[in-house]
Image (tube, coloured by chain):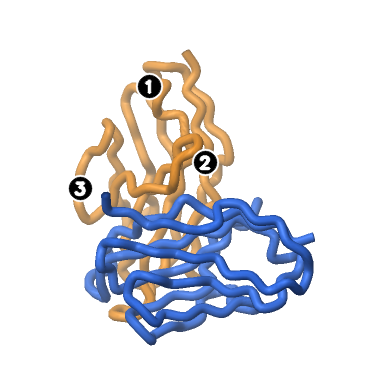
Chain colours: A blue, B orange
Amino acid sequence: EAQVTQNPRYLITVTGKKLTVTCSQNMNHEYMSWYRQDPGLGLRQIYYSMNVEVTDKGDVPEGYKVSRKEKRNFPLILESPSPNQTSLYFCASSLSGGALSDTQYFGPGTRLTVL
Amino acid sequence: AQRVTQPEKLLSVFKGAPVELKCNYSYSGSPELFWYVQYSRQRLQLLLRHISRESIKGFTADLNKGETSFHLKKPFAQEEDSAMYYCALSGGNAGNNRKLIWGLGTSLAVNP
């Protein structure tokens, strides 16, 4: 089944403890992206990747890192999480760097709480 | 500035009634508009996009460039349409970031 998976789905952690949220897609998509969703602010892009080893900042990259060593995986790394990073995180992927109309496929979301 | 506005946070209608979820956008170029839907306990998924001019689950949306709108409509709402609906715009630099700019969403409740 074609899909985007994220792990973990739920995470409670403490300030400063490094964590990684994994994202994997099995559709051979070139483009992958991370969003965070917050009440009243909607979905905002954190980082995106056009292909392997090609990543760039979205709208709210501070406090996050990403890597794209393989096409299928796009982990989100929080080196030193802070309470303001408590949010619902979504990973998404789409086929290629083609038309703007590429459909984005979303993971199920990761609910992160930083105490 | 690029922006998507969904003026209604919550829309409540009765089963069988027409429904219209409003979406207005601000973008200087030629954007691509989408409607995504999130049913309870499910992931975000594409409902329809303007370039396809399709009708999905009875929903349609027409891009009105003059009014910069992309309202989602269905003539007869069903209870299973209850969900969160997001309007989104794709208008990043051509060939570059395919990021979506999102509205804040409208929660549609279809009552029996």
Q: Residue at x 29, y 80 (%)?
A: B95
State the image coordinates of residue A10 (x, y, percent, origin top left).
61, 52
Q: State whether residue B15 is above or below residue B54.
A: above
Q: Residue at x 34, y 82 (%)?
A: A52
Q: Are marks 3 and 2 in contact (CB under 8 Å)?
A: no
Q: Which mark is residue B106?
A: 2
Is B72 displayed left or right of A98 in the figure? Answer: right
Q: Secondary structure at mark 3?
A: loop
Determine crowd level at label 2: few under 14, some 14-19, many 20+ residues with C-alpha closer than 10 A. Answer: many
Q: Secondary structure at mark 2?
A: strand
Q: Which mark is residue B53?
A: 3
Whether marks 1 and 2 lie on the same chain? yes
Amino acid type, callout 2: Thr
Q: Residue at x 20, y 51 (%)?
A: B52
Along the polypeptide, which appears first: circle 1 or circle 2? 1
Which residue is farthest top? B112
Does residue B66 show up? Answer: no
